[in-house]
Amino acid sequence: MSVDAFQAGIFLLVVAALVKPVGAYLERVFQRQKTWLDPLLVPVERLIHRILGIDARGEMDWKRYSLAFVIFSVVNVVALYFLLRWQAWLPWYFPKVMTTPMAPDLAANTAVSFVTTTTWQAYAGENTLSYFSQILLAGQNFVAGAAGLAVGIAFIRGYVHEKTENLGNFWVDLIRALLWVLVPLSVVGSIFLVWQGVPMNFLPYAVAHTIEGGTQTIARGPVAALEFIKNLGTNGGGFFNVNGAHPFENPTPLTNFVELLAIVVLPAAFTHTFGRMVGKPRDGWVIFWTMTALFIAGLVVCEWAEGSMHPALAHEIAGGNMEGKEVRFGVGGSALAAVVTSNGATGSYNSMHDSFEPLGVAVPLVNMLLGEIVYGGLGTGLYSMIFVALLALFVGGLMVGRSPEHLGRRLGPPEMKIIALYTLLGPVTVLVMTAVAVVTDAGRVGLTTNVGSHGFTEILFAYASAFANNGQSMAGLSANNIFYNTTTIIAMLAGRFGLAVLALALAGRFAAARRRPAGAGTMRSDGVLFGMLLAGTAIFVGALNFLPALALGPILEHFSMRP
């Protein structure tokens, strides 16, 4: 067994081992059962409720829950926009190194990207943002991640509740997600990163004198405060321009491993939380293992592509394609990070995807185009996969004459309309935006060096990343201009709020309906056969939507590079 395969195997074993205990803990937190943190956090929670005037017993239907989620996000966007525009008058601003101005379009794009957990960064953090701004963005990583987790829990309640319109209380779920989940784990994780060498200070940038007599400015700051929560909250982005490849963000293979675990564990464990809350643990495990099978398939393709080389260079370079990769991670660590971050709604990559082989970059691109259904973001990954499951049950049920229902919830015409809208929103947004960028001068101007199929892939990758609320990019696309700052905002908003509101609408219909007992005509959703149907549906629907675009991008480039 190779070192890369061993590393990937250990990673998946650790994830699988943590799914049950972490999933059970999440259930206890949001079902308001006793946890070991209660003596410390319950008084804090009550104080926050009292200060903010929150009625913990007040329930919301899907419309009020959606409205609270959207209003909370809009307020954060507006506040963050103005604070970013005013950063020169706020603490820890170093004018000698802050060389990229925070223009209105860039500030708006950055505010939206962090509030939607996209953290799309069309700038270099070390010469654009002050320490104060970085801390503000770290705070957004907390609240945006908690908001996504709250929506995911509300979606599960749609299956749990019966003959009621209530899905819980957004404000209560938000606060519990922060206090019981994100804050404690981030404190522990940040301390671990400081131990491993990640900076945590507010000192000015250091100036080093080189042996040639020149000077070098070395950026530093409160990196550890941002680094762990950006992964845990499936936000992405980075304190520095090169993200997780920077030794101050990700100094060792151990930090790389732990940071990737931080991305995956909560979304993966959410499948077990779903199974426990609906009273069908086997269904949760089927979803988890289906996700894992798709994860392994993508990882095998990516590692194979990056482990090989273009035929013209194969006799000169051993060990695979190391262009754009850090030696301390190698091909295996870089490919694993590419698959994890593109599946986990977290663009915290540790290598330059623009330098990947065409089929290597196709893997993270496909992961995002499929809706990040493999683990995914906090809350979003689960309900994205559930929507695929509902589509699979509907299609499979029709083919074999079984009732289209899931866990006692009937799939009638109103439910299928919501599912159809959810399924089509991504392809319409990504493909239309890509087409507009390709045929207009404003879109093509972002292609600084690459044209043809590679340039097309860069544009498609950008909008797939924005809609998936992922944030990673192929750096060959220069996106800091009014066109891309504006159009990626549209994609980010559609991916965050369009999908979340549709998920809550479906949950509201499920909660209001009466649970139907399983009958002889009900298709089971807790076995291997359903897992195969689920994976097949995800791949088939993705191919129908995106195969022509992929054929114009990475697939064409792959074959054009071969004799």
Image (cartoon, rainbow, N blue to C red):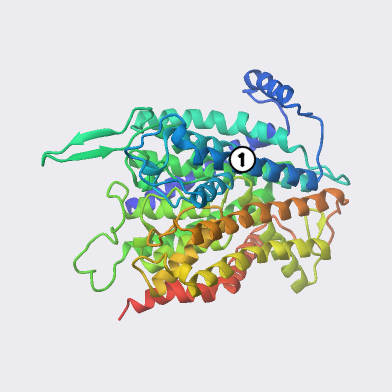
> Is 455 on the left or on the right of 96, as rendered?
right
Judging from the image, what secondary structure is the residue with disc 1 in? helix
State the residue position of label 1.
76
Q: Work out which residue is located at the far left of the displayed protein and give it.
A: 212
For the residue pair 6 and 411, the one nearer the viewer reads as 411
Q: Is residue 20 visible?
A: no
Q: Position of residue 390 (x, y in %)?
A: 72, 60
- Closer to the camera, 96 or 275? 96
- Give percent across and percent down for residue 516: 86, 54
**In which quadrant of the rendered view does residue 423 lie?**
bottom right
Extreme-bottom residue of the structure: 563
The amino acid at mark 1 is: Asn
Q: Where is residue 514 drawn, in percent x and y?
A: 88, 51
The answer to which quarter of the image holds residue 558 is: bottom left
Quick one: 135 or 10, which is closer to the camera? 135
Q: How many marks?
A: 1
* Residue 424 in view (yes/no): yes
Q: Residue at x 23, y 73 (%)?
A: 312
Residue 265 position by quadrant: top right
Q: Quadrant of the N terminus?
A: bottom left
Q: Residue at x 47, y 31 (%)?
A: 90
Tell me if mark 1 has few (under 14), some (14-19) or many (20+) residues whose alpha carbon lies within 10 angstroms of its own: some
User: Where is the C terminus found, in terms of image quarters?
Assistant: bottom left
| Position above or below: 282 against 452 | above
State left or right for residue 275 relative to residue 454: right
Residue 488: percent from left, percent from top: 54, 58
